[in-house]
Amino acid sequence: MRYITLAILAFITATTFAQVEQPRRILEVGATGGLNMSELDVQPQIRQTSLNGINSGLFVRYTSEKYFSMICAAQLELNFSQRGWEEEFDNEVPYTYSRTLNYLEIPFMAHLSWGKEPRGLQFFINLGPQFGILLSDSEEYGGGLKPEERPETVRPIYGKEIDKKFEYGIAGGAGLELKTKIGNFFVEGRYYYGLSDIFNNSKIDDFGRSANKTITVKLGYSIRLL
């Protein structure tokens, strides 16, 4: 009787989970475009305001299943992303300084959504690791700024070469997606927190921490292939 009871319980459990987990086989491709608001998380600290830049790219999304009310998918992106920072100065001086870092950005996200399907409004969250490769960078000086006259804690940042061209971190965001006959339209807000530094960070280096952090707001469109 014990073995029969265990067998019945196993059958009921398997049947229940089979009913809860509903397979999906959906492949979508799309494009996005939006705005980055970036700063450099740096130690010693530098007074900054956000630097605005472009974020645009392509993505592919594969939806594998629906578990209870949650639709589960994986999303791989390839983006061009402008990051960097803009230094903030006292009002009595006319100085300006900004540095723009152009990255090839590769997020690999878990895409979880709730709402109507196959057409209708869905709420979604994206979360996962993100990698970046520095393509180029540029500096802009203004107002007669002379690096040699700046405080010693800030001076090393001017003209400093980026030591590490590869970076990685964690990205997460949320948004709304409208699925229609002619394709899917969405808006998303996302935050990226860099775990790697762009400058060397040993005890003999100028900075102990120098990582990108970025808020992105973007619009997107996708179509279903499968």
Image: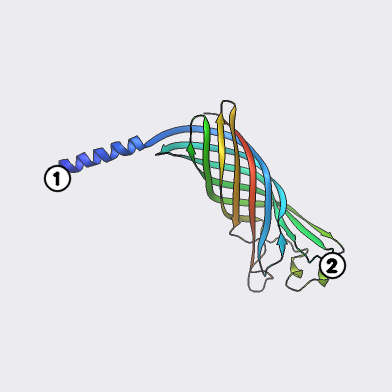
Crowd band around label 2 with a 10 angstrom C-alpha radius: few (<14), some (14–19), many (20+): few
Front residue of 17 and 92: 92
Residue 116 appears left or right of 162: left
Q: Residue furthest right?
A: 144
Image coordinates of residue 116 in percent, x first then y, are 48, 33
Q: Residue at x 42, y 39 (%)?
A: 69
Q: Residue at x 68, y 55 (%)?
A: 38
Residue 39 occupies quadrant:
bottom right
Question: On screen, 115 above or below 96?
Answer: above
Image coordinates of residue 176 in percent, x first then y, are 56, 40
Question: On screen, 107 above or below 207?
Answer: above
Q: Residue furthest front?
A: 91
Q: Residue at x 58, y 34 (%)?
A: 29
Image coordinates of residue 75 in percent, x first then y, are 54, 41
Residue 71 appears left or right of 142: left
Residue picked out by circle 1? 2
Q: Residue at x 63, y 37 (%)?
A: 31
> Number of numbered discs present?
2
Residue picked out by circle 2? 146
Q: Residue furthest left?
A: 1
Residue 89 appears left or right of 210: right
Question: Distance from label 1 to label 2 (Cα)?
Answer: 84 Å
Q: Which mark is residue 103?
A: none
Residue 164 occupies quadrant:
bottom right
For the N terminus, the image quarter is top left
Q: Amino acid at mark 1?
A: Arg
Crowd band around label 1 with a 10 angstrom C-alpha radius: few (<14), some (14–19), many (20+): few
Badge 1 or badge 2: first in the primary sequence:
1
